[in-house]
Image (cartoon, grey):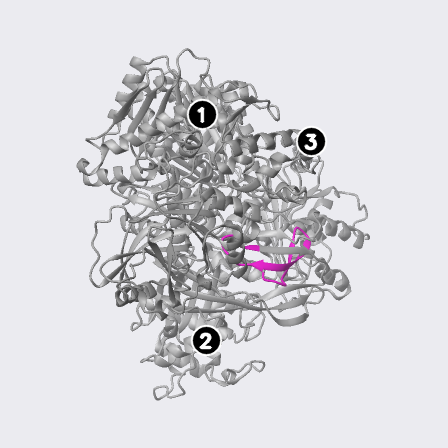
């Protein structure tokens, strides 16, 4: 799927960046690193401090959960231009280089690839701009007409245009005749394009463009032959599925460059992430030198962690009204949320309003476009509701929304008014996160934790400049991550940032790009091996697969050509792993003006969220899905606008079959596995949930969706026998009254609830350690891991041929059958899998970082103050749970995790181990997603 | 490109799917009928196309049998095909004859198919083996039709499997090859699967069935699976598949777009306009020609200009006589010496070598070939010799190709820059003409022929080809074998050179016919008509209309 073009009811709105190559967003990475020239401001003090905020905000005192952290500033560390640059370049530059710019330029002069991972506005663009200038001067020195070109990729088209201007201005300053041109889907076809290909020194594009243009590389021969530098800007945005595609597009580009005898350097610029080196080399397939010692200055900052107060009775109408817009209710924790706090969606706009009233120019970050719009209205309503306090309601009231749904002209206007101080505040999606040139704010407010530390810091970076103080407020929502962050503020201050995950092991994605590569240049033996496109064995298997399918012809010894339908590049979807995408169509009888113009959807997404009868919110409008056509080759979803007082929530059942361990390691007495297997997902029924009040209007309506069968990557933890035996005994009294049937009676239920809770929590906190999207992960807690493994007696092939069980009951029967045939007592534990066909590398990353993730999960569960044994949405409940969050047992989960982490020893078990070997009933093959 | 763009999409007689914009030169059609012809049509095509179009398909291709593809029962489609096309209709799900496998003779040459209603019918029946064993009189069948046969690709496992391999293993004779035709795979699919007779397990797959040297193990069934289903192309599927047979088996398959037939074959007529014309009683090209231009122009969505253009094009299609549109001169028409007609042969669509360059000089009626016969690893010699000759002997001549900007010029340019860099600048400066681009891309001519393949157009214009039986893909495959084995003696060099020469001469034939063709006024202001490439730059500029991104 694309990024956030749909802001739908279960909060997919924050999934991607607001705006992507195909939509439109303005972001910039200012080339000078010293922006804000337009707004003169002599004040050195912030108009309002964190303490003053607490004192002045209505009823803030005494509401408890607010803490103010003081973050020190950092002085600039600079290096004289002349030390690093030749006189032609250092001469015209006014400012010295920051230390990291100098370090990066030095590494580049040693012919290294470089990744610069420093803060927002630290002048990263200048580094590659200067390296391009160096190459240009070198080429001029070599001979009069020699070329030195650079290919520069940005994540969005609007950013490309912004940077085209900045780079051209910069080269004007330097007095260099370097032409920088954008070449993307908006570039006029025909002569304009040809002229750019044949004359530009620097071509700016995006990866969707590179993917397409490689088909016609011969037209680019001049540009590619002379290519000395490839720039991947904002490289941290390439993770997950999208990151895999980019990694393969880069590899295809390298193949073609090599054909033209070009061997360019790579420069990557990244926000601060945990693994810039590993991530960069995964993307480009070469070693990369990391420069992350930030030499740019920052002022001191106050960080206010604001957990909203309990719902005040007299405000009840107001707070409850938040649900009436319909879009954020599920964001706040969903139907089962124990929401006794004011939602962040209500509280954050008040803070925006308050700060601007106190003369602090403020940027509010919201998770969706709709909320950006709503927040502006709510900020204004707050003034009116509190007119006794805000005696001059017009003071600091120039507040506007900003997001990629606005026209470019409109957005430029907003940017300009912010920069010149005409606006007091803006409520924006993450479209402003990468840093439009709007000058620096006095303050930022975040409506909810943005999900990742790198994003959190990136947004904070919009406030404060030089030595000036800045104020940042994080307003926590009800979600797991938000609550974890506000109760564990140290987490934010740790130097670690999430690892970005890019994985090139997904064979489905690899195979698709292999077709493109063969179309671009015949594949041969040089493509196999360490320095080639893929390992020899993998290459041969993929070539054989496509030859048998009639899509490739020839032999690696002499060249393998593409023979399928024209332009295989066109069928690469940069947001899905299989080529199979569903077109989204408006019903024929519907008003064409309401065409949602949604990007195609991945199959996984269609089955979960776009089944017949589902109601989705898109761009603030409700749509009902009236038909789904799964037929290949052109599957589609048809929808029509409706006005409903409910939204739909799909119920999901999951099981794992045929898992095969490829790697394992011991964690104390536990065993952790990584491997592959088949995940069967049944989005079998759905509920209609009232927008007002969250009551279920109708339950268990069949979706008619077929099961989704994925070959994917998994990791799983096996609990040792002694731990299991002791904990079963310890929690044998546990029961869940609402649970039906005999399963509720078993003595295993408490322990099973512990595994289930631990599974939810480990998935829930994974984004704290890794740049993964929780929605791309799934889990399964089970008392019989062995029933989900490929059995030794059954060969892999035979297992593949076994038909997919058509519903969850049939799947459970299959698992039970396998369980009954086991000759040994099975182990219990839980699986975590990548919810994308072929896998994403997410469960692999969890396998590698399991202890860190488990520690976070343990703290989350133990520290939650919900006081309930079955937890709350902030700790172990998950609104995607297929088992309606039953059974869950927090204490049992903490016990299991303490054993994994070695926090508790054997003695913790002794008391509960039965005197005899456990002689109870044979365990039921229970499993819970 | 205009509405006729999809007409450029075609399928090559022979083995693999090829599209003009990345062309391997097409072969000649067989001179005259050499065997039986079967037409494979998906039921949707039969049901959706007007009867008049089906009739035109039948009249144009003259099949000996029509096979309405059938993974499911479509009795209406079968009936409609039977009604519209004068040939026996095979629709596997409706095959009767008591047995699970029925035997269908095709044409007059003793060709016969076995038809399986479904894959399970293969199991139910006695198998092909016994059918021929039991009845000595009855000849063995030449192929088995079974539309359930397809492949399944699982990219997450890097694996492609053959559906119903076990059923095939049970039904087919061991130790030898049986051809299976299926609408479940696109036309052009041609792979030989070796399946263990006992288990149905795939042993190996031969990718070069033409070579056909690997013997079949005694405990194995070899299945040469050949597709007859629609082929995806630019602008949609090419669903009308023509299969040609000789006594020794299937020779070639050609996929056409259904819109190459009937009224829609006329430039400017799509399904909507065809529907409106039908409402006015116009369902065939001759009916269209009988309707006055003025009457056509009154129909909604058709103006005077398009009405006139439709008439002109219909005339060209009906008479086989080309027309020039507007006043644009042919590329090089006013030069004192005519351009040199060239054609190249490579080892595939993503070439690693240009191993043959053929040049026909119309001014002297001589042909010259530059061929790498000795060392297939030597990419430079042929190019070097060609450039030496061209620049040394004919420094002032222009070049002419058919779709050169889609294939020949692009690869020659890239290969010269890479392997003969000394000539790169000179190569750039040689004037290069593309007759296909001029005629079709720039709308300067109306051509007869269902497709714009050179061989089809040339044949329509009366060119009598050399009938080498080759096409670009076969030539490429033959050279690939040479590259792998290093044994040049296997390759029939003369035949491959004759094939290349034939294309060069066919090109000149088309050029001459166009030169002499009557001119009609342009239906609309023909854009860029005058600019037809007096320099390479201009020519390549025009090319951006073809498929530029």
Provide residue B472's location: percent of width, then percent of height: 34, 36
Mark 1 and mark 3, same subunit?
Answer: yes
Disc 2/disc 1 C-alpha distance (Å): 66 Å
Tag nearer the camera, 3 or 2: 3
Q: Horizontally, is B18 left or right of A188 in the view? A: left
Q: Residue at x 59, y 24 (%)?
A: B522
Mark 3 and mark 2, same subunit?
Answer: no
Q: Residue at x 62, y 26 (%)?
A: B524
Q: Judge by depth and name the residue closer to the eye, A343 or B540.
A: B540
Tag nearer the camera, 2 or 1: 1
Name the chain under label 2.
Answer: A
Give the SS element for disc 2.
helix
Comes first in the chain, label 1 or label 3: 3
Please give the residue where the numbered disc 2 appears in the rendered image.
A812
Disc 3/disc 2 C-alpha distance (Å): 72 Å
Tell me where residue B114 sits by quadrant: bottom left
């Amino acid at each position: 799927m694309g990024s956030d073009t749909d802001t739908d009811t279960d909060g997919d709105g924050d999934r991607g960046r607001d705006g992507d190559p195909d939509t439109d967003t303005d972001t910039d990475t200012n080339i000078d690193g010293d922006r804000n020239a337009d707004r003169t401001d002599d004040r050195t003090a912030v108009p309002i401090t964190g303490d003053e905020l607490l004192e002045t905000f209505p009823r803030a005192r005494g509401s408890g959960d607010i803490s103010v952290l003081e973050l020190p500033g950092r002085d600039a560390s600079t290096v004289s231009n002349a030390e690093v640059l030749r006189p032609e370049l250092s001469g015209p530059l006014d400012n010295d280089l920051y230390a990291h710019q100098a370090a990066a330029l030095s590494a580049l002069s040693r012919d290294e690839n470089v990744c610069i991972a420093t803060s927002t506005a630290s002048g990263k663009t200048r580094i590659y701009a200067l390296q391009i200038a160096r190459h240009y001067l070198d080429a001029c020195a070599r001979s009069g007409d020699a070329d030195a070109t650079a290919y520069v990729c940005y994540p969005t088209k609007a950013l490309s245009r912004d940077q085209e201007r900045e780079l051209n201005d910069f080269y004007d300053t330097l007095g260099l005749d370097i032409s920088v041109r954008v070449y993307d889907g908006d570039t006029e076809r025909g002569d304009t394009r040809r002229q750019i290909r044949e004359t530009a020194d620097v071509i700016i594009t995006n990866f969707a463009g590179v993917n397409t243009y490689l088909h016609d590389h011969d037209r680019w021969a001049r540009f590619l032959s002379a290519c000395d530098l490839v720039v991947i800007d904002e490289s941290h945005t390439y993770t997950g599925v999208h990151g895999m595609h980019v990694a393969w597009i880069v590899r295809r580009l390298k193949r073609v460059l090599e054909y033209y005898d070009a061997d360019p350097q790579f420069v990557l610029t990244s926000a601060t992430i945990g693994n810039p080196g590993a991530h960069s080399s995964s993307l480009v397939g070469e070693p990369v030198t990391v420069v992350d010692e930030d030499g740019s200055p920052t002022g001191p900052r106050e960080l206010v962690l604001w957990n909203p107060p309990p719902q005040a009775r007299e405000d009840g109408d107001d707070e409850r009204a938040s649900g009436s817009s319909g879009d954020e209710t599920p964001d706040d924790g969903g139907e089962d949320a124990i929401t006794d706090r004011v939602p962040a969606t209500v509280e954050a706009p008040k803070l925006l309003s308050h700060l601007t009233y106190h003369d602090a120019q403020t940027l509010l970050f919201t998770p969706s476009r709709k909320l950006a719009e709503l927040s502006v209205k709510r900020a204004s309503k707050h003034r009116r509701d509190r007119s006794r306090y805000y005696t001059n309601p017009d003071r600091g009231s120039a507040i506007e929304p900003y997001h990629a749904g606005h026209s470019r002209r409109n957005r430029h206007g907003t940017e300009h008014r912010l920069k010149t101080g005409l606006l007091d505040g803006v409520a924006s999606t993450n479209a402003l996160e990468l840093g439009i040139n709007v000058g620096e704010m006095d303050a930022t407010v975040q409506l909810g934790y943005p999900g990742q530390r790198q994003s959190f810091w990136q947004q904070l970076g919009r406030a404060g400049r030089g030595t000036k103080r800045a104020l940042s407020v994080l307003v926590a929502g009800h979600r797991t991550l938000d609550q974890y962050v506000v109760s564990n503020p140290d987490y934010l201050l740790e130097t670690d940032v999430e690892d970005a995950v890019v994985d090139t092991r997904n064979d489905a994605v690899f195979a698709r790009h292999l077709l493109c590569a063969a179309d671009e240049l015949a594949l041969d033996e040089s493509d196999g091996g360490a320095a080639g496109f893929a390992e020899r064995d993998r290459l041969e298997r993929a070539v054989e697969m496509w030859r048998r399918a009639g899509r490739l012809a020839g032999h690696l010894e002499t060249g393998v050509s593409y023979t399928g339908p024209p332009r295989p590049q066109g069928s690469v979807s940069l947001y899905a792993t299989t080529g199979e995408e569903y077109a989204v169509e408006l019903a024929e009888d519907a008003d064409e003006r309401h065409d949602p113009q949604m990007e195609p959807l991945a199959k996984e997404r269609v089955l979960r969220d776009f089944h017949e009868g589902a109601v989705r919110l898109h761009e603030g409008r409700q749509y009902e899905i009236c038909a789904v056509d799964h037929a290949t080759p052109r599957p589609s979803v048809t929808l029509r606008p409706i006005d409903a007082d409910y939204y739909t929530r799909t119920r999901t059942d999951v099981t794992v079959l045929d898992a095969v361990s490829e790697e394992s390691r011991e964690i104390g007495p536990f065993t952790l596995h990584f491997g592959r297997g088949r995940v069967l997902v049944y989005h079998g029924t759905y509920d209609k949930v009232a927008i007002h009040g969250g009551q279920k209007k109708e339950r268990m309506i069949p979706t008619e969706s077929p099961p989704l069968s994925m070959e994917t990557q998994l990791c799983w933890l096996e609990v040792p026998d002694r731990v299991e035996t002791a904990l079963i005994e310890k929690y044998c009294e546990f029961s869940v009254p609402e649970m039906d049937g005999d399963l509720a009676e078993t003595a295993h239920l408490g322990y099973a609830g512990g595994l289930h809770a631990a599974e939810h929590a480990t998935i829930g906190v994974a984004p704290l350690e890794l740049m993964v999207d929780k929605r791309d992960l799934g889990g399964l807690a089970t008392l019989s891991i062995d029933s989900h493994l490929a059995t030794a007696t059954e060969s892999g092939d035979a297992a593949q041929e076994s038909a997919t069980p058509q519903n969850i009951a049939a799947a459970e029967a299959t698992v039970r059958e396998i369980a009954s045939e086991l000759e040994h007592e099975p182990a219990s534990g839980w699986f975590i899998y990548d919810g994308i066909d072929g896998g994403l590398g997410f469960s692999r990353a969890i396998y590698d970082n399991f202890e860190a993730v488990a520690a976070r999960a343990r703290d989350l569960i133990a520290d939650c103050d919900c006081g309930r044994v079955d937890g709350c949405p902030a700790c172990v409940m998950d609104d995607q749970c297929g088992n309606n969050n039953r059974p869950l047992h927090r204490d049992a989960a903490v016990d299991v995790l303490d054993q994994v982490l070695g926090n508790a020893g054997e003695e913790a078990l002794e008391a509960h181990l039965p005197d005899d070997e456990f002689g109870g009933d044979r365990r039921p093959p229970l499993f819970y997603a | 490109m205009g509405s006729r763009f999809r007409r450029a999409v075609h399928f090559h007689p022979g083995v693999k799917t090829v599209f003009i914009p990345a062309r391997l030169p097409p072969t000649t059609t067989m001179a005259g009928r050499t065997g039986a012809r079967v037409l494979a049509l998906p039921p949707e095509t039969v049901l959706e196309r007007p009867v008049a179009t089906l009739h035109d398909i039948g009249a144009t291709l003259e099949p000996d049998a029509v096979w309405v593809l059938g993974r499911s029962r479509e009795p209406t489609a079968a009936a409609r095909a039977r009604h519209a096309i004068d040939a026996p209709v095979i629709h596997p799900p409706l095959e009767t004859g008591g047995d699970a496998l029925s035997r269908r003779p095709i044409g007059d040459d003793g060709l016969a198919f076995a038809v399986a209603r479904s894959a399970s019918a293969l199991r139910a029946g006695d198998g092909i083996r016994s059918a021929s064993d039991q009845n000595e009189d009855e000849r063995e069948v030449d192929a088995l039709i079974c539309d359930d046969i397809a492949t399944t690709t699982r990219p997450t496992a890097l694996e492609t499997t053959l559906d119903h391999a076990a059923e095939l293993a049970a039904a087919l004779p061991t130790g030898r090859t049986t051809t299976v035709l299926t609408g479940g795979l696109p036309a052009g699919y041609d792979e030989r699967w070796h399946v263990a007779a006992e288990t149905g397990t795939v042993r190996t797959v031969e990718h070069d069935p033409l070579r056909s040297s690997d013997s079949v193990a005694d405990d194995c069934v070899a299945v040469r699976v050949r597709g007859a289903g629609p082929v995806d192309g630019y602008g949609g599927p090419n669903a009308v598949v023509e299969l040609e047979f000789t006594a020794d088996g299937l020779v070639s398959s050609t996929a056409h777009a259904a819109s190459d037939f009937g009224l829609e074959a006329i430039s400017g007529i799509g399904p909507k306009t065809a529907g409106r014309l039908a409402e006015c009683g116009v369902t065939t090209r001759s009916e269209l020609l009988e309707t006055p231009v003025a009457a056509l122009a009154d129909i909604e969505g058709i103006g005077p200009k398009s009405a006139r253009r439709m008439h002109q094009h219909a005339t060209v299609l009906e008479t086989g006589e080309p027309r020039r549109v507007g006043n644009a001169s042919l590329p090089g028409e006013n030069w004192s010496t005519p351009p040199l007609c060239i054609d190249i042969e490579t080892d595939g669509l993503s070439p690693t070598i240009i191993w043959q360059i053929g040049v026909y000089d119309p001014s002297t009626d001589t042909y010259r070939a530059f061929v790498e016969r000795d060392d297939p690893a030597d990419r430079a010699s042929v190019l070097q010799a060609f450039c030496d000759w061209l620049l040394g002997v004919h420094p002032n001549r222009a070049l002419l190709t058919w779709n050169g900007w889609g294939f020949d010029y692009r690869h020659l340019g890239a290969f010269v820059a890479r392997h003969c860099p000394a000539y790169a600048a000179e190569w750039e400066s040689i004037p290069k003409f593309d007759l296909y681009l001029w005629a079709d891309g720039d709308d300067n001519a109306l051509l007869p022929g269902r497709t714009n393949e050179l061989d089809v157009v040339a044949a329509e214009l009366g060119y009598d080809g050399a009938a080498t039986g080759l096409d670009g893909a076969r030539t490429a495959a033959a050279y690939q074998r040479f590259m792998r084995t290093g044994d040049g003696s296997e390759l029939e060099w003369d035949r491959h050179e004759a094939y290349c020469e034939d294309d060069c001469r066919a090109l000149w034939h088309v050029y001459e016919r166009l030169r002499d063709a009557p001119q009609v006024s342009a239906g609309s202001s023909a854009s860029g008509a005058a600019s037809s490439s007096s320099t390479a730059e201009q020519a390549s500029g025009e090319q951006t209309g073809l498929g530029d991104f």
